Image (cartoon, rainbow, N blue to C red):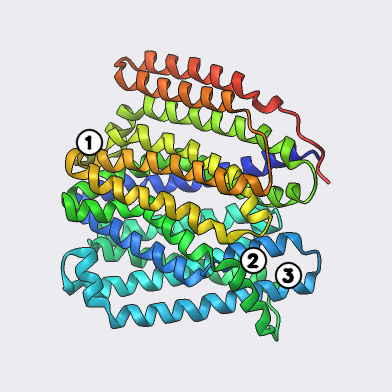
Amino acid sequence: MSIRKSLIKDALLYGVGDTLTKAIAFLLIPLYTNILSTAEYGVYQLIVLFITVSMVLGMSGMNVALFKHFVTSEDEHSRKILFTATMLWVIVSSSLIIGITYLIGRPLSEVLTGTSERGGLIGLAAINAGLETLLLVSLLIFRMEKRPVKYVTFTLIKIILIVIGNIVLLKYMGMGVPGILLAGIAADLIILGPILWRVGRYLTWPVPFKYITSMLAWGAPFIPASLATVILTLSDRLLLRYMVGFESAGIYSVGYKLAGIVFLIYTAFRFAWGPYMFELARGTDAGRTYPRVLLPLIAFLGICSVGLTAISPELFNFFVGEAYHAGRAVLIPISLAALFDAMSLFFGAGMQTRDRTIYVPAVTGFAAVINILLNIWLIPKFGFMGAAWATLISYIALAYMSFRLGNPLMPVRYPWPKIAAIVIIASAGLALVWFIEPLISRLGVTLAAGALLWYISGGIGARFPSQR
């Protein structure tokens, strides 16, 4: 099967699966926005920030190291040792994080929730993060083996369990943010057993200590890189909390979550693309294939951005509590940022495929610093919209630095006029649908912009080499 057909098939499976899971998860938006106040939702988003940071520290880049070495290794025993080493590290590191969190729960609670009396809530968040990290490593097996159906099936079951838990604990028992965390913990515990049973054949003993140290050495640069990514994607909530209050952080987060539909589509592609990225880099096809994949990808993301913004008034009226409607304004910059995130994946591929992961922190760190400085400057002037535009500019900086440091390691010639045309047309389409009132006219602009974007990109007619 050609790379194009395999990639499209896998991306569609991940896409359909993630779309179904997120569609179910989006049912939680009206639940959250009608039960939680804007301030309490802002608190929840800061708890999400803490969970994400805990997962980064617990993983320590081992997931990236596992993915790279597992995909490029053909020896079954080596794969088992790699997987087991990663699992052992995650269990030990996550346990340490949970213990430390309970020791310093009160000051952490003061920073994240505005009161030191919610230390137990922070402890629940640490437990949730540990279980999520363990689950992430276990699910990674299905991605590395190119078995998207199993990956999607387990992910879908988990989301269904989370939704049921949220409805019971949040709506009927009125437990608020603690109920959200307990629902996640319960879902993780229920699903971990069947997943570990499925991937248990990759567990082995003993594991030479050198495997753990070598994987940490390869993956360690992703710790600051991942933390910088957290700053890039979530720190604006913390800055909003201190500069303009929990309410703005909550409103902004809802708009960001809906704009995340575009990032969801990109994530589905990224999951499918990972193995192919490394396989192509081992041969001579990367220089020809990377641009032929990137152009249709960013064109499709542009179409999705315009389409999402076109139906956003109806989407917010139907799904979102009225107190959060102002968050619709962040859709344009946040959804457009997904195009530059996709570019950075391709531009910076050489850092991973050529084992130069030491450059990754410099790339993400640069974007994170830009993000913080812009947030500090723009939030006092423009509120949460300042945070939204800071996010877009930061992703542009991420793509720029990815190209400057990554592309020389694995040179690829990209068609810059076409890339620029796609960004310009998508931006123009977003501006038009924002200011046009009739829905039918907005949909017409979306179709016109979509046809033009797809034509420029070459669409799925781009010719890929055969998969070897």
Residue 37 seen in this snapshot = no
Amino acid type, callout 1: Ala
Q: Is residue 256 above or below residue 121?
A: above
Q: Quadrant of the N terminus?
A: top right
At a point 75% along the width and 46% down the height, the residue shown is 280
Where residue 372 appears, as percent x and y from the top left, is 31, 51
Which secondary structure lies at badge 2?
Answer: helix
At a point 26% along the width and 38% down the height, the residue shown is 385
Residue nearer the viewer, 104 or 162: 104
Where residue 70 appears, as percent x and y from the top left, is 71, 64
At a point 53% along the width and 66% down the height, the residue shown is 135
Left or right of residue 89: residue 182: left
Which secondary structure lies at badge 3?
Answer: helix
Q: Mark 3 or 1 closer to N-term?
A: 3
Where residue 54 appears, as percent x and y from the top left, is 41, 68
Residue most extreme to the bottom: 206
Left or right of residue 379: residue 8: right
Residue 66 tag number: 2
Residue nearer the viewer, 141 or 351: 351
Residue on which the image places disc 3:
79
Residue 300 seen in this snapshot = yes
Residue on which the image places disc 1:
326
Q: Mark 1 or 2 closer to N-term?
A: 2
